[in-house]
Image (cartoon, helix red, strand yellow):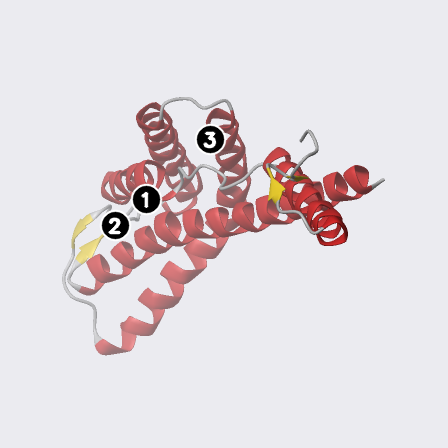
Amino acid sequence: MFKIASAAYAVITASKRFAIDLVLRVALFIGVVIGGTVLFMIVAELVGYLPYSDSPGPGWVGIPSFAEVGHVVSFGLGFGAICVPTTAIYGSLLFLIVRAMERVHIWRWLVATVAALAAGFLSQFIIGGVGWLIAIGAVPVIVAAVLGLIYGAFLLPARPQRSWRNHETHASQLHSGWTCSKESARQSTPCLDGAPQGEKP
């Protein structure tokens, strides 16, 4: 009964940790790729480079007036908001793939390489696909791909600290130690390897 309870507790704990990790990594993906790309687009437009538009097209068009700054910022934030749902979906799939690779103990450098390439591809795919609505230029798409590479290589890979089996083993060890302490106190003998001295462990 104790083993069933400890195993159930370990599964619940691992599930909670996994869900929190998923939410945090997807939020980080959105923040790095979408946030970084939107920030680049806003700054670029404020210094005179238009990163989107079909007429006159992406390019240097001059610094906007002070009255136009609010429109530049709101437009960039609106574009980022449109990208969030798609990014969350692809970010979740990428997270599951990377964690599955880590689960079977694939080399860390290989996990990081696959994650970087996949995240870079997905980032440019998302920005390029959603950016079609605003006739986005090539430069923001390249920026998104670079940010995706950085996220995939350095921010996404992370082996789970402890599996549910480790939790079960740890709980069993604690139970054995507790049982041993009671038996040792009753017999006034020290414990050796989880059993009172004089008994086989």
The percent coordinates of residue 29 (x first, y second) are 42, 47
**Quadrant in which the C terminus appears:** top right
Q: Residue at x 58, y 36 (%)?
A: 163
Amino acid carrying mark 3 in the image: Val
Q: Earlier in the sequence, mark 1 or mark 2?
A: 2
Q: Nearer the viewer, residue 111 or 187?
A: 187
Q: Name the residue at the right extreme.
A: 1
Left or right of 93 on screen, residue 4? right
Residue of label 1: 136
Q: Could you tell me which secondary element the residue under label 3 belongs to?
A: helix
Cα separation between marks 1 and 3: 30 Å
Mark 2 or mark 3: which is in front?
3
Q: Identify the residue at the far bottom of this view.
A: 67
**Disc 2: CA contacts within 10 A as few (<14), some (14-19) or many (>=20):** many
Q: Quadrant of residue 146?
A: top left
Q: Decide which of tag 1 and tag 3 comes sooner along the chain.
A: 3
* Residue located beneath label 2 in the image: 51
Q: Which residue is mark 3?
A: 98
> Of the numbered discs in the image, which one, if any, rests on residue 19?
none
Task: Residue 138 in the image: state x and y as whole percent.
Answer: 25, 38
Secondary structure beneath label 2: loop
Residue 159: x and y, percent? 45, 36
On the picture, is 86 further left or further right than 75?
right
Question: Residue 102's spot in the image, x, y percent?
Answer: 46, 29
Q: Residue 5's image quarter?
A: top right
The relative height of residue 152 versus residue 58 in the rendered view (above or below) is above
Q: Are marks 2 and 3 in contact (CB under 8 Å)?
A: no
The Cα atoms of the two marked residues, 2 and 3, are separated by 32 Å
Rendered-image quadrant of the N terminus: top right
